[in-house]
Image: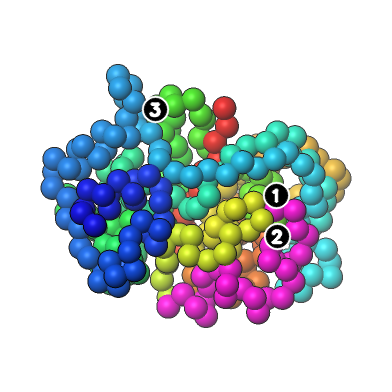
Amino acid sequence: MQKTRIFEALAAGVVVACALSCSSVQKKNTVAMDRGEVRQARARTLDAGVVGPRLSAAFVKIPAGTFQMGSPSSEPSRYDNEFLHGVTISHGFEMEATDVTQLQWFLVMGYNPSYFKSRQYCQSEYISMNGTDLCPNNPVEQVSWDDAQAFIAKLNQGNDGYTYRLPTEAEWEYAARAGTQTAYYFGDDATQIDANAWYSNNSGSQTHAVGGKAANAFGLYDMAGNVWQWVQDYYGDYSHSQVTEPTGPSSGSLHVFRGGDWARVPLFSRPAFRLFGGSGARFSILGFRLVRTQ
């Protein structure tokens, strides 16, 4: 496959495994983009006459609904900050089917902050674009909450009819559970995690191309493992009563991230598990995915 076709497939948000033949994947071809091709590729993400990037990515419609957020006291390995309470999501939204990838980030921001970006970490295709290494379909990582907000601000300059943002913590858990109330969105048996997540025992101590494990019932990939995902909320205690569209505390010093990562044991990939860090924290285990609304 010619490099222009490879790039167009990747920029369209197609998982490499679907965009390339198996032989191409096995060869781990290097695709080098010259300056002119980079400019043309980035131009394809712009609206004519509008200064601001467009995002080419697959989004999944998440319906409105009610669920139990947190975990019951009987759930193994639960933490005290997972108090079980009812939550209503009164408006549907669209969530990105995968984490934001290195290529998506690069096309918007012009650089790649990721640790796992050189050829040795690319399970499928490696690309060098204008001197920047990319494992294009691996999740972008080493991005802070502040970095994610800068990315979102650039997307929203594009005026493509959508408003992009991070999900709230409640939206994230609702989307991850996809109608389930089990310890994991694939059931209560943690030994089934290999088919559903990249984690400490199967990751080889690195990230992997998005979409490589089974999706949940909503069609979302990597809601467990691979990289943690920032959400919009400040960290705080849950309500002890039924709430609608919660957005967390109005202020704070820590922001929540969810989902587990390539270096952690299964219990951290439970939909109820909560972790948090400062808005400037950057780690190779930490990325994000987007929500959009009209």
Q: Earlier in the sequence, mark 3 or mark 1?
A: 3
Question: As shown in the figure, which amino acid type bears the numbered disc 3?
Answer: Gly
User: Disc 1 vs disc 2: which is toward the camera?
Assistant: 1
Q: Earlier in the sequence, mark 1 or mark 2?
A: 1
As displayed, is residue 136 above or below residue 246? below
Q: Which residue is disc 2 drawn over?
A: 272
**Residue 158 disc label:** 3
| Badge 2: residue crowd in 10 Å (few <14, some 14–19, many ≥20) | many
- The magenta stretch is 178-204
> For the point 40% across and 51% down, which residue is it?
14
Q: Locate residue 110: give its quadrant.
A: top left
Q: Which residue is disc 1 drawn over?
A: 174
Picture quarter with the C terminus: top right
Q: Secondary structure at mark 3?
A: loop
| Badge 3: residue crowd in 10 Å (few <14, some 14–19, many ≥20) | many
**Residue 1 disc label:** none
Is residue 66 a member of the stretch shown in magenta? no
Question: As shown in the figure, which amino acid type bears the numbered disc 2?
Answer: Ala
Most extreme residue toward the right, as rendered?
241
Q: Position of residue 60 (x, y in %)?
A: 57, 44
> For the point 57% across and 75% down, which residue is it?
194
As displayed, is residue 88 above or below residue 265? above
Q: Earlier in the sequence, mark 3 or mark 2?
A: 3
Residue 212 in view: yes
User: Left or right of 168: which side holds 228?
Assistant: left
- In this orientation, which residue lies closer to the viewer: 97 or 110? 97
Residue 239 in view: no
Is residue 194 a member of the stretch shown in magenta? yes
User: Left or right of 242: which side holds 98?
Assistant: left
